[in-house]
Image (cartoon, rainbow, N blue to C red):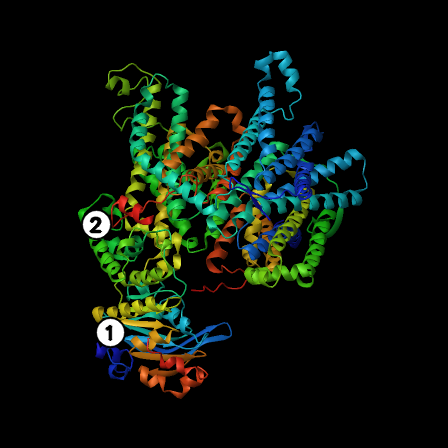
Amino acid sequence: MSVTTASGIDVHPLDLRAMLKEAGITALVIFALAAALVGFETTDIPGGIGINTRFDDVAVVVALGFFGRIALILLRVHRPGPVLIGAPVLVVVMLVMLLAQSLFGPETGAAVQRFLPFQDPVVLWGLLFVTVVIGIRAYLSRRHIASEESAQAREERLDHFAAQVQHAARFLGPALLAFALLFPFLPAANRHLLDIAILVITYIMLGWGLNIVVGLAGLLDLGYVAFYAVGAYSFALLATYLDVSFWISLPFAGLMAALAGVILGFPVLRLRGDYLAIVTLGFGEMIRVILLNWYEFTGGPDGISGIPRPSFFGIAEFSRSSDNSFHDLFGLEYSSLQRIIFLYYLILAMAMVVNLFSMRIRKLPISRAWEALREDETACRSLGINPRNTKLTAFGIGAMFAGFAGSFFATRQGFISPESFTFIESAVILAIVVLGGFGSQIGVVVAAILLIGMPEFFRELQQYRMLAFGMAMVLIMLWRPAGLLAHREPTIRLFGRGKSLESKS
Amino acid sequence: MQNSFAYFVDQLINGLTLGSIYGLIAIGYTMVYGIIGMINFAHGEIFMIGSFVSIITFLILGMAGVTWVPLALLIVLIVAMLLTSIYGWTLERVAYRPLRGSPRLAALITAIGMSIFLQNYVQLLQGARNKPMQPVISGGVTVMQDQGYVVSLSYMQMIIIVVTVVLMAAFTLMITRTSLGRAQRACEQDRNMAALIGVNVDRTISLTFVVGAMLASVAGLMFLLYYGVIDFFIGFLAGIKAFTAAVLGGIGSLPGAMLGGLLIGLIEAFWSGYFTVEYKDVAAFSILVLVLVFRPSGLLGKPDIEKV
Amino acid sequence: MTAQAAAAGGAPDAEIPGGGAASITVEHLTMRFGGLIAIDDVSLQAATGRITAVIGPNGAGKTTVFNCLTGFYKPSVGRLILHHPRHDYLLERLEGYRTAQDAGVARTFQNIRLFPRMTVLENLIVAQHNKLMRASGYTVLGLFGFKGYRDAEAKAVELARYWLDRIHLTDKADWDAGNLPYGDQRRLEIARAMCTEPLLLCLDEPAAGLNPRESHELNSLLTYIRDQHKIGVLLIEHDMSVVMHISDHIIVLDYGRKISDGTPEQVRNDPAVIRAYLGDDEEGGGGPS
């Protein structure tokens, strides 16, 4: 049915009726999806709830679905012409309208912007982005690249890219670390930036920890935050009830978290993967419920406050007036920033320990067994590998690192409550690992900066954050199930790297 | 008071009501698991969407002046089933179908992603606050009285239990008697073989999601009527509990899902009635772990023989 | 060894057709799945340094015997005694993975089960897991880069290399196992099983899907394993050219029962076998390949 043109591109005949029918069905489905939830908004009114209508939004969404579908069909049959015209026009119109205030002055601009379908700029920019993507795809399909590529070829190309990134990380990593070490002394580094950096590094550490469990061992842990909570509470309770110092409680908190992981893992790790996922999900919720209700011990919803800050390795305190304060010890002026910088280095060091650990353990038999178990548990048993213990190790180690991160969190905040340990946190950490790519250390760094750092800078994005995370997880799994920057480098080679690449052809 | 028989009967009624709701959601989990072997994590969210569609429809009907309760209920039921089932259909079509045959982990993560997405989608569109609703059906009958403790069965509870029984009967008929049911059972046993003998596998799977979503939307409606308040987060816990119910009954088994739902409802009601309300969620979860450890095939499920 | 086998209740060695000391003794093995009896009171022995073939029509229960031997199923009735130099192991009492770890029973699968996204070499290293775990001080010492572990790893690579040379895959050592051609994957699976340094090697249809040349290569690999490594080799096979050429001892199952047990010569002429194969015995005669 297809015709090959002189340029060698297949041009499928365009069935206009079929196209309109398909687009019509899409529009209809979108209408049904949007009718209730988009079309009506429940609002709070005194003594109950009332309802607002948003029919214009429904109309816009349906129209977008209709034309978007037509554009995709046109791309599929290699007739990108109308899209090549339509997409740029739409982009220009939207850009002009979005920037109307600065282009035409506030008054005219506001008048123009009244014609915009949605009032929220984030949605509009998102729409603009999608239009640009479709436009680029149209352009590429004209030149016969992306759309005709087989799934395997695409996977190979992506894997190659990921391999290059990992290769680059060998030089980039130390450079990044050097930057991270110098960061607090850069002139731009203020309190706000340092706080964000500490947050991002905490998530990098959690991501690396979870990557051992999910990326290497292939165990989907949806309650990772529970171990984070165990670490945080162990630390907080030890420090406030028994007055144990940070440096002594830290290993203990990690141990408690690892123990929690082993106790949970022991009965359930022999189960199939999806059961494990839901049990860990339930476990995360259970820990939260217990923390919330065990008033005598955990303070319930009020949490634990007055958690001591870490000292300078037990030598000096970060306080203005103390017998042995940090600034006196080093003959510095007192500054509240000193403690923040110390916390920054502390989490950086902890994260680097996890990183080093992850890189080293890949060369050890335990990690190979994790990967082998992920590939084929039956075969592993036939080779005499104990599946349960091997998985437990991964689970326990992952939990331990979460526990360490948890105690850092507790000491940094000085206050913890169950609210900090909801499922959302687990989902965020999982999203970082998924986006970064299973087993990819550098991927986690990139993903954490993107997912945690970005919303901190652009506050408007905050409310769309989880929506975007959910969508990103789905899209990445559809596009590349191993994660964006996943590339598996063999843990051991018989020949050098070059030789194998050559023989692989 | 806790010692009286009446108190026990009261908890029994509460448990049966709650169990009906869990059972209806659990069927969705168990059917999807039976046919494509994955846990549809987003199913709890479908339930939540069902109750949001219901509350919105109630509000619209209220504005339109439909005040006769049976008619209003019927309209809400139909609208909720229709619109929610389209969510179920779209979910499968957009997120799960392209991943059929890819690693299990990928499908699981997609399901989690969809769950997070839908939760936040509803939160963004409808706000994060609780959505309370005036009770539509009030009143009830007194069942018994014992040592001054009055046990009443509200009309609401009656409706929930009756609707569940009717739906279950209709649903069992559908699975055992109709061609869709046959196709569904065929796909459950061997999807490739079913395709070879001319069963439209894609359509059957789609319909499974549609039916599951319909039952979940009914559960959503009943949840709304029973508790009178919903928010975007109700799908999370209800989802875990309904899944526990499905596992307890034996995942893949339809009567098992209903039985499991009732048991979880009863356990939760009695736990709250006799021990502490706070830890009722912990109880449900502990049961999940215990069942998985000691009887992974559940009460009515078939044991899984490993083929090597 | 003889005394042990006798003490364990096994038949004296001399009785094993094809000769050799007993490597495994199966007594009254019965396996039921619900109402179905997959294996019904089967007793057999396989000898060290010999190749023993288990043949039989489809559904005769061959793979089920293997699954019982290698710890994947727990037999309903019966004893499985592995004669280890240390002491005898009752396999039915060992937890699944321990049949390989302690008793030294290795196996391959009917549908190849490699680790497809790990390299050929890694597949062979994973097979030496338990040895390497000990060498790495259960990970703790390995993390700090102790020399003992590095030496152990080098030795493991040496062993892997030895088997790679035997199966002619040395060039492809760094390929992903999943990218190998089918025949190579079959041989790699055998090599991987051998890397566990087993006493008994169980092969589930190793020649399935191989072309005549590959099948011939397989024969020489199996005879090499028998002659050089002196371990027991137990194989399920449909390809009679393989069975008749290399087996020292053949056991025939049909409908879960043992119907014949002897040297290839004896089995070939056993009327019960001819009946079971419905006159397909010409195939049993084996063409001169």
Circle 1 Cα neighbour tier, 10 Å, few/some/many (<14 / 14–19 / ≥20): many
Q: What amino acid type is highlighted by mark number 1?
A: Gly
C233, above or below A376, in the image: below
In the displayed structure, does residue C81 sit left or right of residue B27? left
| Residue under numbered circle 1 | C49
In this view, the mark in front (2 or 1): 1
Q: Is B97 positioned to the left or the right of A441 in the image?
A: right
Residue A228 position, x and y percent, is 41, 38
**Quarter occupied by the C terminus of chain C:** bottom left
Residue farthest to the front, as pictured: A6
The amino acid beneath tag 2 is Tyr
Task: Name the image quarter holding residue C263.
Answer: bottom left
- Alpha carbon separation for disc pair 2 and 1: 32 Å
Earlier in the chain: of badge 2 and badge 1, it is 1
Question: What residue is at 57 percent from the left and 40 percent from the top?
Answer: A78
The image shows residue A402 at horizontal and vertical percentages of: 38, 39
Q: Position of residue A91 (x, y in %)?
A: 58, 26
Q: Please indicate, yes or no, whether residue A257 appears anywhere in the rendered image.
A: no
Q: Which residue is mark 2?
A: C149
User: Quick one: SS at disc 2?
Assistant: helix
Q: Which mark is residue A237?
A: none
